[in-house]
């Protein structure tokens, strides 16, 4: 049987595609600028292989011009251009990517900065334009061509005149619809265009120029003079691609502020270049202060994600574990598998690998800070320590290994904050457990009768002031083989054989008294016993088993 080809209603297909794959109309500019950048890249690769050509940096740029009267937006590039056949193939076939083909042919050469791969980005222009004109001349031909389409009735190609090699894309913006919410006028507005370029295309490696209006107040009169100046809008070289040795603390702080990662100053930063099986650049920050909504549901964790310098996602949550949700910053990688809209990522191995890598970088950065800069670390811990403790507690203690060395607790020794490693290191040989007390304030815990015996022995005592503390260490069970023991639960077993004997004797001597007490307090206590742990206090309450009195209080407050 003869196979027949599918006939597609291409205009409807185009319409559907363009309006359904992109969540925001403004990205059309990102797509056209990315194409222009790819075209210049191709020209650049050409100069690497063709000795008769030289690459003169100044000759290569992208220019965006808005004409309010004509309602057109124009994107000019000095890239490689297209000949007639290429126009037909690349702009006449949806989902045909000349750039992907180029990358495949040039795999051996360093071609991975090329952005295009799906062959649909160009058509996003039809989200805002009802007619698009492309005038282009290929580096390989002396004849220029003009391609034009209204997005629904196909396209035309005809020869035309064009001086230079490269392309001019002209969008005839759609008319604003009365009573419709959206307006297309914004894409003629200088400030708005600058903002879109900055947002998505700031790190395109070639200058993106615009004619910008400047207003200058005349000295001797009230008049302001309007002048138009050509300006480069993008910063081009992203700070993360620069060498660490070229950068100062101030550069990193400026970037933090520029990006509005926070309104504070970063407490610490880390600049990462990874060039192995996975390649990425990243700058990570630990903020100084807790964002006001940090411990609320509204807080969104995530890092900015770039693919070859183009912004893909403003907050990619998959790059950070919840317990490091306070980290701010960005990741740029050439190796991401993007989906067709370049907005959503495939949840694939590359992303997971980057996330894993980033997690261990943050961990070692924090460990380093704890070791070398205790003052800063304590500041950090004050702001975000609770989140780390929640991390230990959640996921059934899965994160214990990652987090246990980053925790700090108040200690009975010199009322300092100590890490568990500090604690264990200072333990006298005969000490078996890590002792802790729970309570609402350190002062109160210091006065607990149960604390006396432990401190008398010369053992250090951890004071847990936050609800999450005890839950977290219950999940950990032990640290370096030392179990945690609440001074309020069960028998501490700190007495000598002699003291034990004495207690036993005294218990049997006073059996009647204790039985009497037990029956009087029958509905309040489980048992009344002789204690060897009390020194200056006559009596204390203890809990038996895993749940301490403090935990019980919290559990009782929780809604059912
Ligand atoms: P993609 O960029 O994913 O390949 P597009 O739909 O954005 O898909 O573009 C399709 C193809 O058209 C590109 O791969 C490229 O070959 C060609 N193209 C688009 N814009 C230009 C341009 N400004 N200069 C040269 N070629 C271009
Ligand atoms: Mg493209």
Image (spheres, helix red, strand yellow):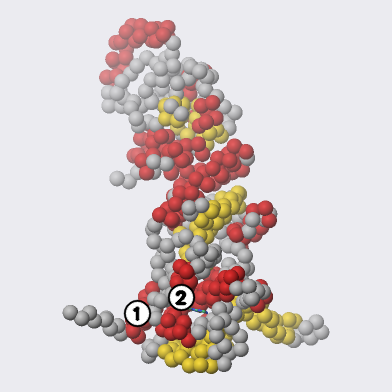
- Tell me residue 224's x, y (percent): 73, 85
- Tell me residue 26's x, y (percent): 48, 76
Q: Image point 59% across, 52% down: which residue? A: 271
The residue at label 2 has a CB less than 8 Å from ligand 1: yes
**Residue 360 in sight in this render:** yes
Q: Earlier in the sequence, mark 1 or mark 2?
A: 1
Left or right, 399 with reference to 38: left
Q: Image point 37% across, 23% down: which residue? A: 490
Residue nearest the observer in this picture, 21 or 522: 21
Residue nearest the observer in this picture, 177 or 213: 213
- Residue highlighted by disc 1: 16
Q: In what element is the residue under mark 2?
A: helix
Q: Is residue 357 above or below residue 306?
A: above
- Tell me residue 193's x, y (percent): 56, 78
Q: Where is residue 543, by image quadrant? A: top left
Q: Work out which quarter of the rendered image holds the C terminus and state it.
A: top left
Q: Where is residue 93, by image quadrant? A: bottom left
- Residue highlighted by disc 2: 98
- Residue 342 has which mark? none
Q: Image point 59% across, 80% down: which residue? A: 78
- Tell me residue 363's x, y (percent): 51, 44
Q: Where is residue 80, by image quadrant? A: bottom right
Look at the numbered discs 1 and 2 and tell me whether their residues touch, using CB distance below 8 Å.
Answer: no
Between the residue at mark 1 and the residue at mark 2, the CA separation in whole angstroms equals: 23 Å
Q: Residue furthest front?
A: 51
């Amino acid at each position: 049987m003869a196979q027949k080809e599918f006939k597609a209603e291409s205009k409807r297909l185009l319409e559907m595609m363009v309006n359904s794959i992109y969540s925001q109309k403004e990205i059309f500019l990102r797509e056209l600028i990315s194409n222009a950048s790819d075209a210049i890249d191709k020209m650049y690769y050409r100069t690497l292989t063709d000795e008769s050509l030289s690459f003169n940096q100044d000759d290569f740029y992208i220019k965006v011009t808005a004409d309010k009267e004509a309602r057109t937006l124009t994107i000019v590039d000095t890239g490689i251009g297209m000949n007639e056949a290429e126009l037909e193939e690349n702009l006449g076939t949806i989902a045909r990517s000349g750039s992907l083909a180029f990358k495949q042919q040039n795999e051996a050469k360093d071609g991975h900065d090329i952005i295009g791969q799906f062959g649909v980005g160009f058509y996003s222009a039809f989200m805002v334009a009802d007619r698009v004109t492309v005038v282009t001349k290929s580096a390989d031909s002396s004849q220029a061509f003009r391609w034009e389409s209204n997005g629904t009735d196909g396209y035309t190609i005809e020869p035309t005149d064009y001086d230079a090699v490269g392309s001019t894309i002209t969008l005839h913006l759609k008319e604003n619809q009365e009573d419709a919410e959206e307006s297309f006028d914004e894409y003629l507005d200088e400030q708005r265009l600058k903002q879109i370029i900055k947002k998505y295309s700031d790190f395109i490696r070639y200058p993106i120029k615009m004619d910008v209006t400047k207003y200058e107040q005349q000295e001797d009169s009230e008049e302001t003079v309007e002048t138009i100046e050509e300006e480069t809008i993008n910063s081009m070289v992203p700070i993360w691609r620069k060498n660490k040795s070229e950068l100062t603390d101030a550069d990193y702080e400026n970037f933090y502020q520029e990006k509005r990662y926070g309104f504070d100053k970063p407490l610490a930063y880390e600049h990462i270049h990874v060039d192995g099986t996975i390649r990425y650049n990243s700058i990570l920050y630990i903020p100084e202060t807790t964002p006001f909504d940090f411990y609320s549901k509204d807080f969104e964790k995530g890092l900015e994600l770039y693919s070859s310098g183009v912004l893909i996602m403003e907050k990619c949550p998959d790059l950070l574990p919840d317990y490091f949700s306070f980290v701010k910053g960005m990741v740029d990688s050439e190796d991401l598998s993007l989906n067709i809209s370049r907005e959503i990522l495939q949840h694939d191995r590359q992303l997971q690998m980057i996330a894993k890598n980033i997690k261990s970088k943050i961990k070692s950065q924090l460990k380093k800070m704890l070791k070398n800069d205790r003052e800063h670390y304590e500041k950090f811990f004050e702001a975000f320590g609770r989140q780390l403790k929640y991390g230990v507690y959640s996921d059934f203690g899965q994160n214990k290994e990652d987090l246990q060395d980053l925790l700090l607790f108040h200690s009975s020794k010199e009322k300092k904050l100590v890490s568990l490693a500090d604690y264990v290191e200072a333990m006298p040989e005969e000490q078996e457990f890590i002792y802790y007390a729970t309570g609402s304030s350190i002062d109160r815990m210091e006065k607990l009768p149960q604390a006396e015996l432990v401190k008398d022995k010369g053992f250090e005592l951890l004071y847990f002031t936050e609800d999450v503390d005890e839950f977290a260490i219950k999940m950990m069970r032990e640290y370096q083989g030392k179990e945690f023991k609440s001074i309020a639960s069960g028998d501490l077993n700190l007495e000598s054989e002699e003291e034990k004997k004495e207690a036993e004797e005294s218990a049997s001597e006073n059996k009647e008294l204790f039985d009497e007490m037990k029956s009087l307090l029958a509905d309040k206590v489980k048992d009344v016993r002789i204690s060897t742990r009390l020194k200056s206090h006559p009596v204390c309450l203890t809990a038996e088993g895993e749940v301490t009195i403090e935990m019980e209080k919290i559990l009782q407050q929780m809604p059912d």
